[in-house]
Image: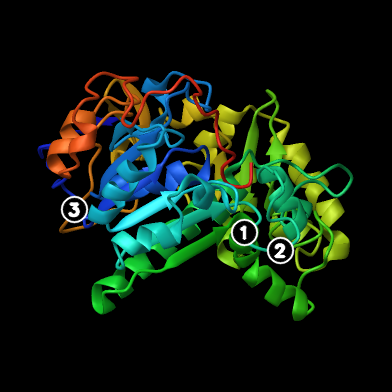
Amino acid sequence: MSSASGDSDPRSGRGPGPLAGVRVVELAGIGPAPFAAMLLGDLGADIVRVDRPAASPVGIDPAHDLTNRNKRSVVVDLKSPDGPAVVLALAERADILVEGYRPGVAERLGVGPEACAAVNPALVYGRMTGWGQDGPLAPRAGHDIGYIALTGALGMIGAPDGPPAVPANLLGDYAGGSLYLAVGLLAALLDARLTGRGQVVDAAIVDGTTHLTAALRGMLAAGAWHDRRGSNLLDGGCPYYSVYETGDGGHMAVGALEGRFYAEFVRLLGLREEDLPDRHDPREWPRLRARFAERFKSAGRAEWTAVFEGTDACAAPVLSLEEAARHPHLAARGTLTEAHGVTQPGVAPRFSATPGALRLPPAQPGAHGGEVARDWKVPALAAPEAPGAVAGLAVSDVPGPVAGGGH
């Protein structure tokens, strides 16, 4: 693993990355909205996270919440009389604002799109939810697993004779949510730079996850995909695009789809292609799978890894998170890096002329009030200097977490 650090002044907001100079206000939440803001921060944007005067809803030490890296934090009590005005002062100076509340919450707090547009017509206002800003389920709570269930995505994942497999919260929250929000924010920012007019970006996890199924829905319409899991070319149904248990309880992933890669895979597996069932006939797939499974059981994962290493057989060991951090390819690229005392993903994607960097460790809530007051010229933030200090009137009625992303 390599080390990563920024050589810019973190107080200036002008660091490495193609988004250097872009100012982003993030209203604290959980899940996909913080991740999207982290992505913008990794690419150089100056992210000011507006935390609440309450414990983090994530439930882990803020020093280890990597979705808060490359950000600065101020604490604002939006339920105090002065709180909304502080956020609006930040919005007036920002290019982008990101929130992950349920529909209507930002408006009730006085920091919704109309209030922000009144002080900054060019502001891009990003809204991250699970169900979207409208529709029958819009006001309801939810989580990744429910969003991907309704889109049909969850039903495609897993063995045909068992329940769907839960892909952590990567598919909904982060792929269908965060990444679509980030793309939408950048597209709207480009338009705002050209026209001087901002707009609202409604990023719903159900929309993004459904969008991810475009290619498979095309295959379904063409009759090349069966609407049942574990029976298709790319969902584990195909024996040469699947996962096999090794003799020591490990697993190997196989993706030998093309003819020449399949031939290499079969040869290295110790079999002869002419002795195997026809790989192009799905009726023969169970017999072919059985032959492959038998061979993989004959040796451990490390042995099979060595067999396939450096070949075009398209077979790889299934690693844990800790094992992945030690893989030589990821180490050579610095895909995982040691920064600020934590092993974490490096910046992605990479840029030849304006590379991003891990400039700042995860922001401690309220740690940067004075800095942001100076850099963004918002005097109301000048008083809070220590973590936990609150801009606006510090009231005893501390607001609890506002459900974000439809949560």
For residue 372, above or below residue 177: above
Q: Earlier in the sequence, mark 2 or mark 3?
A: 3
Left or right: where 302 falls relative to 244: left
> Type of residue at label 1?
Gly
Q: Which residue is mark 2?
A: 135
Q: Earlier in the sequence, mark 3 or mark 1?
A: 3
Given contact means CB atoms under 8 Å apart, are the residues at marks 1 and 2 in contact? yes
> Type of residue at label 2?
Gly
Residue at 23 percent of width and 35 percent of height: 380
Q: Which residue is mark 3?
A: 20
> Type of residue at label 3?
Ala
Q: For label 1, count other residues whose C-alpha is less than 10 Å away and answer few (under 14), some (14-19) or many (20+).
A: many
Residue 274 placement (x, y as % from top left): 74, 61
Residue 368 placement (x, y as % from top left): 23, 29
Residue at 52 percent of width and 27 percent of height: 58
Q: For label 3, count other residues whose C-alpha is less than 10 Å away and answer few (under 14), some (14-19) or many (20+).
A: many
Residue at 60 percent of width and 48 percent of height: 102
Give the position of the C terminus as an image quadrant: top right
User: What whole-number distance in Å separates the C-alpha atoms at marks 2 and 3?
Assistant: 37 Å
Closer-to-camera residue (55/273) = 55
Residue at 82 percent of width and 67 percent of height: 226
Q: Nearer the viewer, mark 3 or mark 1?
A: 1
